[in-house]
Amino acid sequence: MALLEVRDLSVVFQRKGEEPFAAVDGVSFDVAPGQTVGLVGESGCGKSVTSMAIMGLLPKRGNKVTGSVKFEDTELLTLSDRQMRDRRGRDLGMVFQDPLSSLNPVIPIGLQVTEVLERHRDMSRKKAMVEAADLLNKVGIPDPRRRLTEYPHQLSGGMRQRALIAIALACKPRLLIADEPTTALDVTIQAQILALLADLVRDTDTALIMITHDLGVVAGLCDEVNVLYAGRVVERGSRHDLFAVPRHPYTHGLLASIPRLDAPKGERLSPIRGSVMDNIPWTSGCAFAPRCPNATDVCVEVTPTMESDPVGARNSERLLRCHNPVAQEVPA
Amino acid sequence: MSAPLVEINDIKVHFPIKRGVVLDRTIGYVYAVDGVDLSINKGETYGLVGESGCGKSTLGRAMLKLTEPTGGRIVFDGVDLSSMKGEKLRTMRRRMQMVFQDPLSSLDPRQSVESLLIEGMRAHGLDKGKESTGKRLRELLSAVGLPSTALRKYPHEFSGGQRQRIGIARALTVEPDLIVADEPVSALDVSVQAQVINLLEDLQKEFGLTYLVIAHDLAVVRHISDSIGVMYLGGLVEEALSDELYEEPLHPYTRALLSAVPVPDPVVEDRRERILLAGDLPSPANPPSGCRFHTRCPWRQSERCDTERPELREINPGHRVACHWAEDIRDGKIRAHEVKPELVEMEWDTPVDDASLAGPASITETLGP
Amino acid sequence: MSTRTEKIDALAKKAGHIGDDPGVSLTAAAWRRLRRNPVFLTGGVIVMAFVVLAILSPFIAPHDPAVPMLGDQVIKARNQIPPSQPGHPLGGDQVGRDLLSRLLVGSQQTLLVGVLATLIGLTGGLVLGTLAGALGGWVDTVVMRAVDIMLSIPGLLLAVSIGALFARPNIYTLIVAVATVQIPVFARLLRGTMLAQRHSDHVLAARALGVKPRAIVFRHMLPNSLGPVIVQSTLVLAISIIEAAGLSFLGLGNPDDRTPEWGQMLGTAQNVIDSHPQLAFWPAGCIIVVALGFTLMGESLREALDPKSRR
């Protein structure tokens, strides 16, 4: 049974005097217990809004959320604010992109950790402080007892991110959502933080949703990968399958356009033509069609649906939303 | 490739740290760039990489004298720029231009594209008449892939990638020899990055340009550069041709850096040997003695590393490394060891970039196949 | 070369992103938004009415404001002043002059004071602020410390002090006093925006291009600094009017009360405020409404010109 089941999640933003804008337009995916799932896509594809919708953190007004988000069979979208607050921290944890703005600058780190512990695990302040020091140690912050009384601005960016992870994991949630957790960090720290995340989720058997635009990060960390485009999932597969055999032209195009560290210099990049402004709505056909090298007439008339893709499936199931995928050799 | 177009010698940029109530007193310095030598040949692309706080952006600006160097020499096409200022420097600027990271803030929001592009031409007397200038503008716009209708529009009406193209076109209006590109694609979407990278390469061929590309993305730099220089805490620690740097990194920091870059290939990722660095990045206001990297170096030795600052010396032809023990590490005579992290207290007002390095003692993790 | 230009132009036309229409500058975009903003429109209407009234008042005022035509209806002993009557809808003041006419013509003086004080303050502040912001260094330090000292004294108090320095106060000393108080406000504002501009990327880009320093200041830095200044001007206009009224009230304005001015009218009405509150009510009301008009305009302008609220 899946830990988290997202079905046809849609978030439409409506501002006064403007056209309604569907940031998320029918996203569906599953997360199994202990699994690491990646949501990858560029800016504007709806990945961050998806995570905010799952956590119930979207602003009250100006948007409409439809669809279903089931966490262990409980529908999250219909829960009241209070019920959702109970779950956040206890069952669902979140790590955000910018550690400086996600931590309260006027409260010491220790209190920010114990706050979660006292709320959800009913601990006394004293016990919570001891537990907090233990948590900071587990995420690799040196000299944790001294750090408990320090403020966020006294820590470096990497350490702040570790503190955020500690807070998110304080109550041992079963699901952790990490929204671009390393985008603002230098590459050597990114390596540390990703290694830390991988270790922690493995030790505690926590499921992880990793949201990022960096395909390299996903290649090293996630079990399953969902590729998002214009608010919908267009391809899904296991890590090895997706990168070895990218079937959707967008995935394929993206991989071909990224300069790779291990590729020799001199091979010209093949960018995807056009830009995200060249989309057509999903209701009219395939949003990627105007930029797609494989586009056919049916692509601008009929909306493609998410289907199982036997050609791409090597080790596990593949799902694909495309009328005319990238041709691959079927293994003998 | 031929003679050097730009040569810099022992460039230093030290920013004073000022405190005071009525009058500001200098209580220390941030050693943003602390003694760098490098040269760029005509027609080639030199990539400068490093993480936050290494001084690469400051070096780029110092090279163009947009930030006044505290010491050292800059020689551009045989002309010594070091003591040049005023009108002479202004006219010299024609030959060396800059492309900025953030396309939105580097374009004046109140001027139309046409006005932005003409500005440079006017400043150097290249605006010879409405006809010829108009033609040149349209040609430049098409060279960067934008239509003539863009001239009447304003920066906020374009997308990020288009704005970056406008910025590149602006740099080209004055017919420069050198272009310093400071993180030219970091602020752009992944699918747009490739377009702009290709554009830069095409323009280099078409106009015979020399590039200094400053970036933190190693993969981008490797792709576009002929030579690469790696910076750490204000100094150049390694310099080599791009392929050789990747295949045989000799400086411990370079090795750690390369091992940390994610590659979009699960097979490669699973097999990699990761070298994780320990401790905090030292403050550029208070750099370590001797070798700047010795506080976090997995190959640090008890002699020389903490007392003597290593020179950038040539180990292989065209490959320079600033490490006392580079040959021994390469030949396997010295092995990596665990490093005790040295904590650095973050100071309240020190202008150090936030994303400093930190971490526990674990050094090398070999992830099984 | 030109075939490539033609090709790209044709492609772009087909794609339709960068259309052939002329671009919309930021100012034009802000104006479009302002036109639909009810706050701006309300303030704008009030201000327009005020300005029109002030200009036309000598012609539309029913009677001469200086002539005490109802003087025979003033009975000092019984504290009586001319009531509202046909031809004089608001009645008369303590000396028998038509109140309505005095109000109408008074707007002229008030407008004059407000506008002149703001203009002088703006010019002085612009010069000082630009010098400090563009030159930096010790010029900046000296100017800013002087500004700090002036700003540490409450505005009205400072205006009163300056006004009282003159042996024979009149309308021009009033303007000078009020203007002097506004100079440091503009100076600090300009200096701040210029400093921000000096460190901005587009100014750095202009330097890198080799644009001459004067061109950078006047084409890059000043236009981008004007937004907050325009907003501040409207607010300063409102403040100037109120401060001028205050100074007149205290007797530091024009001593000759044949030329009406709202603040002065308010001041002389204090003697009879218990028995005839309308003499204070009308001028005060006018001051409030006009100040409100300018403030509404200023606030909506600030919102429209703020780059962060731009979409």
Image (spheres, rainbow, N blue to C red):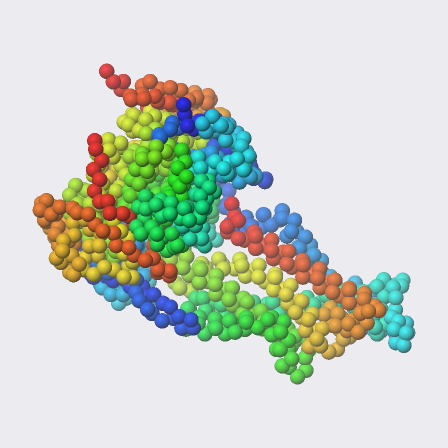
Residue under the point 16% across and 49% down: B299
What residue is rendered at 44% in x and 59% in y? C197
Task: Please provide percent x and percent y for residue B339.
Answer: 21, 50
Q: Residue furthest top?
A: A332
Which is nearer the eye, A326 or B208?
A326
Q: Is residue B196 left or right of residue B275?
A: right
Residue C308 higher or lower than C104, as above or below: above
Residue drawn at the location 54% of the way across and 37% of the way down: A81
Asked if residue C69 shows in the view, the reply is no
For the C terminus of chain B, the quadrant is top left
Asked if residue C248 lies left or right of residue B318, the reply is: right
Residue C117 is situated, as x and y percent measured from the top left of the image, at 62, 69
Figure check: A273 above or below B40: above
Number of numbered tags placed on the structure image = 0
Compared to residue A325, the image places residue C265 above or below, namely below
- Residue A319 picture quarter: top left
x then y, percent, for residue C25? 51, 49
* Residue farthest bottom in this picture: C167
The residue that appears at 27% across and 45% down in the rendered structure is: A188
**C218 vs C242, nearest the viewer:** C242
